Amino acid sequence: MPSGDRHSVSRRRLIAASLGLPAASIMPTGGVGLHQGGVLPDPLVERVAAWITERQQLDALTLEWGNIETQLRTRAGRLGVDIDSARGQELPEARAMRVLDKKIETSHREMADVAEAVSLMRAVSVAGALAKLELGLRVQGKYSWQDNAMVLLESGAEELRTLLARGR
């Protein structure tokens, strides 16, 4: 891509946009971004960034849950009970795991709600279309098909084609 082509996107800017960083402008002309002289960002970028932040928090909760489960397994072994019995008891680890279970469940619901909302939104910039594609890939994950992934990917790709054809 020639460097003067207003549709060209640098690899660095593409990566920044794919990470959902709203302050990063991927348009060579500075058409989208929080710090481009008052130009408003595409709302999709902010929503996808919120989803990514929620996902990172979920990952931290899941890691914490796993660490506590390891502690509970150790305690259960010392008490001579199986892990399922230990989970049902009022041991501090079991209580902490139940609290985390609720937080994890809430996080999953919030992420699903954001993904659904984003799937219904229309990108108004290349950054928004790329953010929508990124969310589709993240929702999809590595293993099994997830709700909203196909809608996000198809609509993000279509919106990107439309925006590039218009020169946005």
Image (cartoon, rainbow, N blue to C red):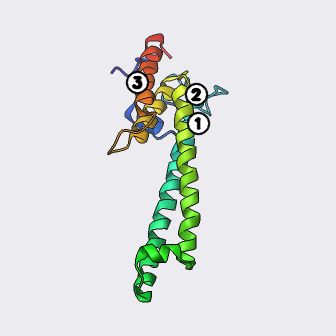
Q: CA distance from mark 2 to mark 3?
A: 18 Å
On the question of residue 22 being in view, the answer is no
Residue at 51%, 54% in the rendered image: 58
Residue at 46%, 36% in the rendered image: 135
The residue type indicated by label 2 comes to: Asp
**In the image, residue 58 above or below residue 70:** above
**In the image, residue 57 above or below residue 122:** below
Name the residue at the top extreme. Answer: 166
Q: Mark 1 highlights which residue? A: 46
Q: CA distance from mark 2 to mark 1?
A: 7 Å
Q: Nearer the viewer, residue 127 or 86?
A: 86
Q: CA distance from mark 1 to mark 3?
A: 20 Å
Q: Which mark is residue 42?
A: 2
The residue type indicated by label 3 comes to: Glu
Residue at 33%, 21% in the rendered image: 1
Q: Mark 3 highlights which residue? A: 154
Q: Which of the marked residues, 2 or 3, is nearer the chain's N terminus?
A: 2
On the question of residue 134 being in view, the answer is yes
2 vs 3, front mark: 3
